[in-house]
């Protein structure tokens, strides 16, 4: 896999209100909806490490590649001063393998993913950053350079080739069950975009229901043209990627 990077940005005000304690369930079955989405992803990686996970017009990523990149994101996030479990992380990345690696990397670090469309207005980005009290923002160099409000923020490079395939489940308590996994914002076509809070169990149950209803098998390869930042595209992504035997195909489209 060629050298690929992401940019980790932190805002000027790192002070955030303390969050309450969340009950951490003990789950022995990582395939259960009560398990964490990050742990389920790692279980699939262990069983299908060399299988094709994602293809684009120019790249092929195996599950091992994807997990290594996600581990690099998780490691970098954990190095952010003050970062703690449950912190929100804005994900401003177009449909791509990097988006998927960053999504699972945030989960493996114990964070909460807040996907955001890269072409949305600057004022909306600031509003969502403030309302979610996000600890950091992950984007690409190209998107950062194209958005003046991001160029002024402190930036660290995440080398996606530098991850260590270490399971978060080993010696650590991964967020799971009814704990918050992601916040997806509505498009705001009828007013101000509203955040929809989804737990690990919500996302896993949704993926499992789609797999069962459609009978997704080893040869299913979806062409994902829907933006991953929205619920429909997110459902297609996880339902196929977590099927294990299958692989997710998508084009790197400018969403």
Image: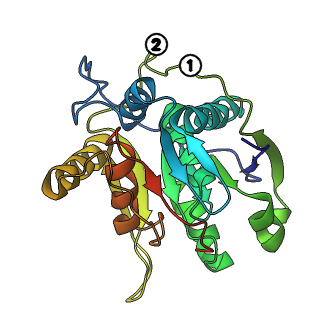
Q: Determine the secondary structure under disc 1.
A: loop
| Percent coordinates x, y for residue 133 in the rendering | 56, 53
Instruction: Measure how far apart labels 2 and 1 are at the Cα level.
Output: 8 Å
- The quarter of the picture where the C terminus appears is bottom right
Residue 1, by quadrant, is top right
Is 51 placed left or right of 80 in the picture? left
Q: Can I make out residue 110 in this image?
A: no
| Percent coordinates x, y for residue 105 in the rendering | 56, 38
| Percent coordinates x, y for residue 182 in the rendering | 42, 51
| Percent coordinates x, y for residue 4 in the rendering | 76, 47
Alpha-carbon neighbours of circle 2 within 10 Å: few (<14), some, or many (≥20)?
Answer: few
Residue 190, by quadrant, is bottom left
Q: Are marks 2 and 1 in contact (CB under 8 Å)?
A: yes
- Camera-side residue: 37 or 216? 216
Q: Is residue 17 above or below residue 133?
A: above
- Camera-side residue: 170 or 187? 170
- Camera-side residue: 74 or 16? 74
Q: Determine the secondary structure under disc 2.
A: loop
The residue furthest bottom is 190
What is the number of the mark on residue 221? none
Q: Is residue 211 above or below residue 124?
A: above
What is the number of the mark on residue 170? 2
Is 32 placed left or right of 141 in the picture? left
Alpha-carbon neighbours of circle 1 within 10 Å: few (<14), some, or many (≥20)?
Answer: few
The residue furthest left is 213
> At x 44% / y 72%, what residue is drawn?
226
Q: Can I make out residue 23 in this image?
A: yes
Residue designated by label 1 = 166
């Amino acid at each position: 896999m060629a050298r690929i990077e992401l940019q980790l940005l932190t805002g000027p005000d790192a002070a955030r209100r303390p969050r309450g304690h969340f009950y951490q369930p003990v789950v022995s079955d990582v395939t259960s909806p009560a398990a964490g989405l990050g742990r389920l992803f790692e279980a699939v990686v262990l069983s299908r490490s060399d299988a094709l996970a994602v293809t684009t017009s120019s790249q092929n990523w195996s599950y091992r590649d994807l997990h290594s990149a996600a581990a690099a994101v998780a490691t970098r996030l954990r190095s952010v001063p003050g970062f703690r479990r449950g912190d929100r992380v804005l994900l401003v990345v177009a449909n791509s393998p990097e988006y998927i690696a960053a999504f699972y990397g945030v989960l493996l670090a114990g964070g909460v993913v807040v996907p955001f469309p890269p072409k949305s207005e600057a004022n909306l980005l600031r509003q969502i950053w403030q309302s979610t009290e996000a600890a950091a923002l992950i984007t690409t160099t190209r998107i950062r350079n194209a958005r003046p409000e991001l160029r002024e923020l402190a930036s660290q490079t995440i080398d996606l080739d530098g991850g260590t395939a270490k399971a978060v489940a080993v010696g650590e308590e991964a967020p799971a069950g009814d704990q918050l996994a992601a916040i997806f914002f509505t498009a705001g076509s009828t007013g101000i975009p509203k955040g929809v809070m989804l737990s690990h169990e919500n996302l896993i149950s949704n993926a499992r229901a789609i797999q069962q209803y459609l009978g997704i098998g080893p040869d299913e390869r979806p062409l994902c043209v829907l933006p991953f930042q929205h619920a429909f595209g997110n459902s297609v992504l996880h339902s196929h990627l977590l099927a294990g035997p299958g692989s997710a195909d998508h084009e790197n489209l400018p969403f």
